[in-house]
Image (cartoon, helix red, strand yellow):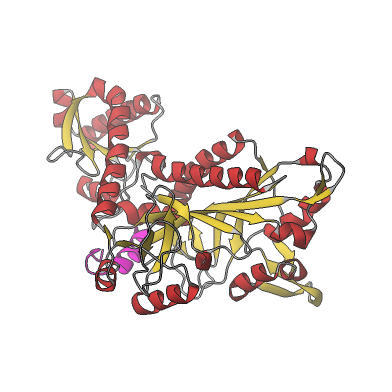
Amino acid sequence: MTPQSEDFSAWYNELVVKAQLVDRGPVRGTMVIRPYGYRVWELLQADLDRRIKDAGHDNAVFPLFIPESYLKREAEHVEGFSPELAVVTIAGGKDLEEPLVVRPTSETVIGEYMAKWIESHRDLPLLLNQWANVVRWEMRPRMFLRTTEFLWQEGHTAHVDEDDAMRETMWALDAYAGVARELAAMPVVAGEKTPGERFAGAVRTYTIEGMMRDGRALQAGTSHYLGTNFAKAFEIQYQDEDGQLKLAHTTSWGMSTRMIGGVIMTHGDDKGLVLPPRLAPYQVVIVPIGRKEQGERTAAEARRLGAAIKAMGIRVHVDDNRPQLTPGYKFNEWEMRGVPVRIELGMRDLENGVATVVRRLPTVEGQGKEQIPLEKVPELLPGVLADFQAFLLARAEAFRDEHTATVDSWDDFTAQVTGGWANAFHCGRGECEDDIKADTAATPRVIPEQAPEESGVCVKCGRPSAYGKRVLFGKAY
C-alpha cells in the first residue's frame, strides 16, 4: 500500500478495499459494505443500541420517502440540506403530484408523527430511535466518510421544556463519547459547535471530534437541541397540567458508519488496519503451520485450541482451509486486516507444548511476540486483548496531545493547522470563520466541554473572544 507519510488519502482508499471492508457501489458515491466491514458496524451497533434502550428509548422505523412539503415547513432545515437532496419525481411511470425526497435525515417526517401521537404532558418525554440508511448526494465521496448512501441511527425525542431536552441532548453526547472511547479506542473531544457549524434548524449542536493519524479532525457523532423550531413547523403540542397548549422541545442525535472510517484512520499504519479488540470481527486468528501429516496435526490442534478460546467468549477464527497459501502470506494478510492477536501453531510449538502469540502492535517495546503454554492460552487471552484495547486508546490520546497546541498568533495558528489542531481564541463571527477557512482550510471543530474558562482576543481578527474559552480548530474530513 501507499505509505501514510507519502499520501494518507491514497493509503486509506487502498486499505478499505484490500482489507475487504467495502467495495465500490454501482452508482458514484455508493458503497457495498462487505461482511468483514459490516461485522465492525454490527458490533458498534449492538453496544450503542443497548445504551439507547437502557436509557428508555424505543426503536421505530419511518418511511424512506418524505414529501417535499415536509422539508419546506422548516425553512432553515431545507436550506441547509438542499444541495444534498435526492428527489423522486416519477414513479410507476407517471409524474408525481408532489416530489418525494429520499431521506437525508428524519426530523420532518418524525415531527409529523410526533404531532399526531402527543396530546398531553403525560405523553412526554417521547423517546424514539431509528436504525436506517440515508441519502445525501456527495460531490466528493470517500468510503465510510462521505458516501451518497450510508447507515446510521438517529434519535428523535420530544420534551416538556428546555431543561429536559438539554438533559437528553447531553445524554446522547456522553453516550457517543463512551462508544468512541470504550469500543473504538478513540479519545474524542466533546463540546459544542459554533453557530456557523450548527445543524440546519438546531438551536445548539454538540459534537465529538477525533484526531486522525494525519492530524485532521473527524466529526464522529452529533447531538442537537432543536428548541421549538420543529415543534412550531409541525405543531408538536401538548396540554400541560393547567390545560394550556404548549410547544414541545425536541432533540435529534446521530452516529453513522463514518465511525468505521474513524477507527481505520485513528489506529491504522503502513501495514494496514489496526482494530481495537472490542470492534474486531476476529479478535484472534490461529494459523496452523505444516504440510500433509504435520499440517493435519497442527490444524487439529488449532481447531481444539480455537474451541477453547471461543468458550471464553472470544471471537476466534482458525485459518485451516486454504492450503494453497503459505503461512507467511496468511500472517501478512491478517496483519493487514487488523486482527489484534495472531496465534502461530507449528510442529515445534506442539512438541514444546506452546503457542506463539503475536500482537498486531507491541504494547511494550520488544513484546509483540511471545510463546505461551498451550493450556494457558485461553485463560490469558482476555487479559491480552484488554491490554491491547487500553494500549490503543493511550497511544491515540498521546498522538492527539502531541499534535495539539495552544496558539495566540496568526503565524503560529497557520503553522499548527497544517498537521494538527490549534487551540485558540475566536470572536464567534461567521465572517471570521469564513476568512480562516479560506486562508487555511481549517474550521472550528469544537468548543471543548472540559476546557478551562479563559478570555482573550481572536487569533484572526483581534476582536474579543466570544465563548469564554478557547476553540479547537483543524482541517477536517
Q: Nearer the viewer, residue 272 or 131?
A: 131
At which x and y percent is residue 60?
69, 46
Q: Is residue 50 above or below residue 148?
A: above
Does residue 301 appear in the picture of this structure? Answer: yes
Does residue 21 appear in the picture of this structure? Answer: no
Residue at figure coordinates x 48%, y 48% from the top left? 41
Q: Is residue 456 above or below residue 115?
A: below
At which x and y percent is residue 201?
64, 64
Q: Is residue 454 above or below residue 414?
A: above
Residue at figure coordinates x 40%, y 71% from the top left? 463
At which x and y percent is residue 46?
53, 40
Q: Quadrant of residue 384?
A: top left
Q: Is residue 466 left or right of residue 1?
A: right
For the N terminus, the image quarter is bottom left
Q: Is residue 67 left or right of residue 436?
A: right
For the C terminus, the image quarter is bottom left
Q: Is residue 6 on the magenta stretch?
A: yes
Q: Nearer the viewer, residue 82 or 164?
A: 164
Q: Quadrant of residue 307?
A: top left
Magenta segment boundaries in residue numbering? 1-21
Q: Is residue 425 on the magenta stretch?
A: no
At which x and y percent is residue 122?
79, 37
Residue at figure coordinates x 67%, y 58% from the top left? 106
Q: Nearer the viewer, residue 396 or 8?
A: 396
